[in-house]
Image: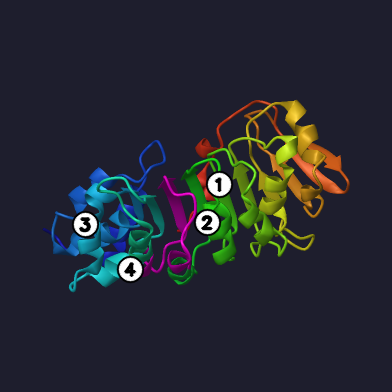
């Protein structure tokens, strides 16, 4: 076929990278990677930019690709968003150590989308390995874990680089072990915080743990839980939000409204919507 400059090939691929629903078009990129040698590498590099649904049954295939002597290291560096499921006891599941291996093989990962099944907490050995492997992460999206799990607070403790946090599960009152850690203060400095629900007033300690790293000098944080207007009073009553300069509650599609409480600007939207449906473009790496 006629020669096309690599820059033009990459432009064509990037222009068609997303489907109409905003998801990476893996079928298109896979087909382009088979066109010819000139198209193979640009298409594969984009194909590996967003890795989704990584779990036990496809882990070996993915690991072989990013660890292969030929292009493995280069492909691993292409991964920017990683969605992975881990578990301790489920058959053919990925373990926390598999997550460590993937993060090490993919040092450019910007966003981790995590599902943790049956894991109440990470052991110390795994935490130390995760600390080093995930030190470059900027965004954490916790899709699933048990309500009493302390892994969220463990990960925030070892990954102070996290600025964008999405939680699509209910988080209960932390264990005494996590509460003891909270007295030292979370090291994170959140810019964007999205919750699936507002914790009850009696669980204000959870709210405090999530935002106590935000100082008056931080960039404004955004809070996007669904719920009713009455929940706003519960949230505003919590001393946890006092350091925030701006607090945005994206509760629906109507224009947001600004509330002020103890010096903190609070923007709310009364119509419920799922935070998981909010655009990831707020923090997605190019």
Please state the extent of the stretch shown in magenta in the rendering: 103-127
> Above or below — where is 47 with respect to 161?
above
Taking depth in this image into account, of 50 and 104 the one nearest to the observer is 104
Which quadrant of the figure has residue 99? bottom left
Position of 279 with respect to 95 (left or right) is: right
**N-term-proximal mark, 3 vs 2:** 3
Dot 2 falls on a residue whose secondary structure is: strand
Please say whether residue 136 is one of the residues in the magenta stretch.
Answer: no
Q: Residue at x 63, y 32 (%)?
A: 226
Disc assigned to residue 166: 1
Dot 4 falls on a residue whose secondary structure is: helix
**N-term-proximal mark, 3 vs 4:** 3
Which quadrant of the figure has residue 18? top left
| Residue labelled with disc 3 | 60
Neighbours of disc 4 within 10 Å: few (<14), some (14-19), many (20+): many
Q: Residue at x 49, y 54 (%)?
A: 121
**N-term-proximal mark, 1 vs 3:** 3
Determine the CA span between mark 1 and mark 4: 24 Å
**N-term-proximal mark, 2 vs 1:** 2
Quarter of the figure that contains the C terminus:
bottom left
Quarter of the figure that contains the N terminus:
bottom left
């Amino acid at each position: 076929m006629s020669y096309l400059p690599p820059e033009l090939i990459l432009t064509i691929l990037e222009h068609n990278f997303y489907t109409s629903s905003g998801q990476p078009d893996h079928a298109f990129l896979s087909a382009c990677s088979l066109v010819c040698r000139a198209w193979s590498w640009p298409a594969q590099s984009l194909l590996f930019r967003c890795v989704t649904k990584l779990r036990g049954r496809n882990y070996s295939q993915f690991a072989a690709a990013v660890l292969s002597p030929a292009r493995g290291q280069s492909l691993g560096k292409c991964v920017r968003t990683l969605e992975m499921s881990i578990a301790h006891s489920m058959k053919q599941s990925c373990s926390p150590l598999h997550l460590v291996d993937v993060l090490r093989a993919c040092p450019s990962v910007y966003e981790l989308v995590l599902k943790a099944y049956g894991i109440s907490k990470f052991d110390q050995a795994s935490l130390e390995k995760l600390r080093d492997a995930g030190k470059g992460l900027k965004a954490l999206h916790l899709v699933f874990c048990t309500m009493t799990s302390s892994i969220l607070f463990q990960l925030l403790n070892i990954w102070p680089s996290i600025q964008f946090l999405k939680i699509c599960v209910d988080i209960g009152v932390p264990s005494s072990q996590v509460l003891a850690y909270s007295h030292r203060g979370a090291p994170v400095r959140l810019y964007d915080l999205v919750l699936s629900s507002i914790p009850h007033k009696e669980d204000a300690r959870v709210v405090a743990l999530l935002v106590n790293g935000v100082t008056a000098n931080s960039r404004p944080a955004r809070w996007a839980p669904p719920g009713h207007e009455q929940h706003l009073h519960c949230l505003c009553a919590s001393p946890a939000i006092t350091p925030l300069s701006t607090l945005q509650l994206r509760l629906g599609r109507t224009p947001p409204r600004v509330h002020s409480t103890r010096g903190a600007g609070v923007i709310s939207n009364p119509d419920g919507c799922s935070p998981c449906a909010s655009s990831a473009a707020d923090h997605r790496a190019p």
